[in-house]
Amino acid sequence: MLKGKRIIITGSARGLGQAFAISLVEKGAHIVIADILETEGSAVANSLQKSGYDAHFVQVDLGDPRSIEACVSQSMKMLGGLDGLVNNGAIATGIGGVSMEDIDIDVWDRVMNVNVRGTWLMTRAAAPFLRQSSCGKVVNVASDTALWGAPQLMHYVSSKGAIIAMTKSMARELGNDNVCVNAIAPGLTLVDATEYVPKERHQLYQNGRAISRAQLPEDVVGVVNFLLSDSANFITGQLLPINGGFVMN
């Protein structure tokens, strides 16, 4: 399903993005780990290479348009083409617990620049290469916080709501070029990037899920693999919540 697919995953030096990267190479994909965290991202790529997988690291700052263009250009030299893009990179760590009255304007702007504008610019830079694929795929990583309105996190929630809306517009614009664009909305997942989240918030999620347990990376990676595969060639503009039934469409 994914053997030979050439895919860029942003924000994949750690957390869910790293889980996506590992799962994709294990399925035979050729990947670029794109992240601002050079040490961590290089370590992941090197580890995968030592295991015999085709993985590369390219540093990117999603808040810098020039960095995004350079990332895609460098990735094309490494991959020789592009079949998929996972827009996972985002600012989330350390910004929660602030009421809407107290959100710093500079922090708001940074979150929007990275999470929203960065997703748009990555997709814009990748689009010409995705069009050359037999059926290019974009998977945007939103969040179920945008579906239930998590409090004291409005800048992040707003950015993820924008991702959901952008996904529909992107799907309309790229559909005639046989490029599918979909979004996922994971719930709070147990990864290193969510260790800062208070235990009470983790428990809130677990208690509210129809499947009442902690959410793990392996609960999410299969859906991303599917959306990047040829089995999803006629699915576009859709949002898939992955949260054990905490939010139901």
Image (cartoon, rainbow, N blue to C red):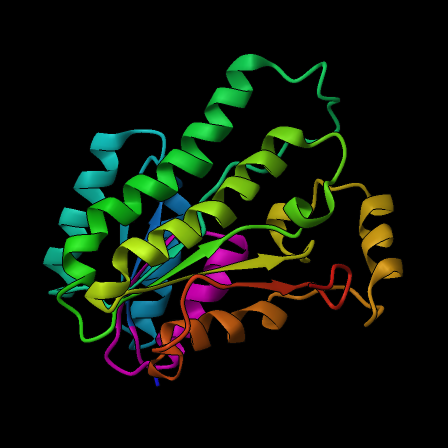
- Nearest the viewer among 30 and 108 is 108
Tell me which residue sits at (34%, 78%) in the image: 233
Q: Position of residue 174 (x, y in %)?
A: 26, 58
Q: Position of residue 25 (x, y in %)?
A: 35, 74
Among the 4 quarters of the image, the one containing residue 175:
bottom left
In this view of the protein, can residue 163 be seen by the observer?
A: yes
Tell me which residue sits at (29%, 77%) in the image: 52
- Nearest the viewer among 108 and 177 is 177
**Magenta range:** 2-29
- Nearest the viewer among 151 and 10 is 151
Tell me which residue sits at (33%, 56%) in the image: 172
Quarter the C terminus occupies: bottom right
Quarter the N terminus occupies: bottom left
Reply yes or no: does residue 28 show up in magenta: yes
- Total number of numbered labels? 0
Name the side, left or right, on which 110 lies relative to 82.
Answer: right
Q: Position of residue 2 (x, y in %)?
A: 33, 80
